[in-house]
Image: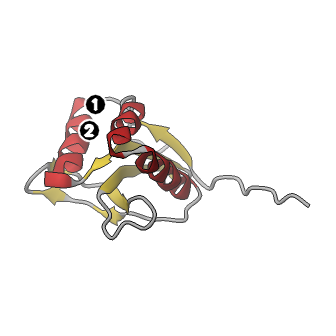
């Protein structure tokens, strides 16, 4: 008997550069890309909820966004972050995925939000 996969709880809408973020993670090995895909799946199914971000000294205002930590299985640290915001009750907007090192991921997310390129996190659908 085959078990049916549960439908995702949230629809994910991604910034246009998120696929490039996944390609960049390949520099850390294919396991890092797989871990990012797992984090996205966990986010879509509501298995993880990120830590709320706010006005950050290093990167700027990230109010309304949250960050999910992840890494390859067995890693003693969680080097990577997925930054997202809730667009509506059933849609989450993925802004950026990448390395936390030197707060790079938070600066990237702030830049993308300031750039006004999708997903639009300011409107409730």
**Which residue is under mark 1?**
116
The residue drawn where x is 13% and y is 49% is: 60
Disc 1 crowd rating (10 Å Cα; few below 14, some 14-19, many 20+) is few
Q: Position of residue 73 (x, y in %)?
A: 46, 63
User: Which circle marks residue 13 in the picture?
Assistant: none
Instruction: Please tell me which residue lies in front, 29 or 91.
Output: 29
In the shown orientation, is residue 123 left or right of residue 63? right
Q: Position of residue 46 (x, y in %)?
A: 55, 62
Going by the picture, which residue comes out furthest to the bottom? 76
Q: Position of residue 51 (x, y in %)?
A: 33, 66
The residue drawn where x is 70% and y is 53% is: 7
Instruction: Please tell me which residue lies in front, 5 or 54.
Output: 5
In the shown orientation, is residue 42 left or right of residue 118? right
The residue drawn where x is 18% and y is 47% is: 104
Cα–Cα span, label 2 and label 1: 5 Å
The residue drawn where x is 55% and y is 52% is: 41
Name the quarter where the N terminus is drawn.
bottom right
Going by the picture, which residue comes out furthest to the right? 1
**Image vertical order of residue 3 relative to residue 116, above or below:** below
User: Which circle marks residue 113 in the picture?
Assistant: 2
Q: Mark yes or no: residue 116 visible.
A: yes
Cβ–Cβ under 8 Å for marks 2 and 1: yes
Q: Secondary structure at mark 2?
A: helix
Tell me the colour scheme of the image: secondary structure
């Amino acid at each position: 008997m085959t078990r049916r996969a549960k439908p995702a709880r949230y629809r994910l809408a991604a910034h246009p550069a998120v696929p490039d973020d996944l390609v960049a993670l390949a520099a850390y090995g294919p396991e890092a890309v797989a871990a990012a895909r797992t984090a996205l799946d966990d986010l879509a199914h509501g298995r993880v909820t990120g830590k709320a971000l706010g006005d950050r000294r290093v990167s700027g205002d990230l109010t309304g966004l949250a960050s999910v930590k992840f890494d390859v299985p067995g890693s003693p640290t969680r080097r990577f972050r997925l930054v997202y915001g809730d667009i509506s009750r059933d849609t989450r907007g993925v802004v950026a995925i990448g390395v936390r090192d030197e707060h790079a991921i938070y600066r990237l997310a702030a830049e993308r939000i300031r750039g006004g390129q999708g997903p639009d996190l300011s409107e409730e659908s």
